[in-house]
Image: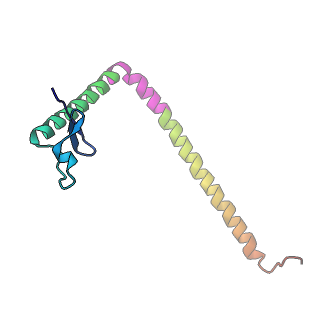
Amino acid sequence: MSTNQCDSTTQQCSTGDQPSHHQASNNSSECCDMPEKLLCLADEAWKELMKEKIKAQIQSTCGEKLDNLAKIVAEANGAKWQHKIAAKHHCHTYQDNVRQFFTSHASCQEGN
């Protein structure tokens, strides 16, 4: 019995090890006929549903712990960005001070 496989990223289907007629043809952007497309769609729906079920299971067993971890990560991320913004401010202040120094000492020449 052959199996239909569909790559949803390339929209290409194959039957077993052999590419489908449409996949082998360069003149057609269609790789699957409608029944094959529907089977591929069903596979994708099953994967999405399974992912949702797994998420729900993780939420029910570990939700509170994950909430606590998320809070720790969010707080650390906020502190990181505050530090970056402060560092950027200090960098701009330094650049302004150097610019001001050279502007006020423009008449200085090397060797004098």
Q: Position of residue 45 (x, y in %)?
A: 20, 34
- Magenta residues, dominant SS class: helix
Indicate the quadrant containing the C terminus: top left, top right, bottom left or bottom right.
Answer: bottom right
Give the image quarter of residue 90.
Answer: bottom right
Count the marks: 0
Residue 70 belongs to magenta span: yes
In the image, what residue occupies the spot 15% across and 40% down? 37
Q: Position of residue 78 (x, y in %)?
A: 51, 42
Q: Residue furthest top?
A: 61
Q: Is residue 101 left or right of residue 63?
A: right
Q: Is residue 15 left or right of residue 67?
A: left
In the image, what residue occupies the spot 85% across and 76% down? 110
Q: Nearer the viewer, residue 65 or 45?
A: 45
Q: Position of residue 94 (x, y in %)?
A: 69, 61
Q: Is residue 32 above or below residue 28?
A: above
Magenta region: 59-72
Indicate the quadrant containing the N terminus: top left, top right, bottom left or bottom right.
Answer: top left
In the image, what residue occupies the spot 17% across and 53% down? 28
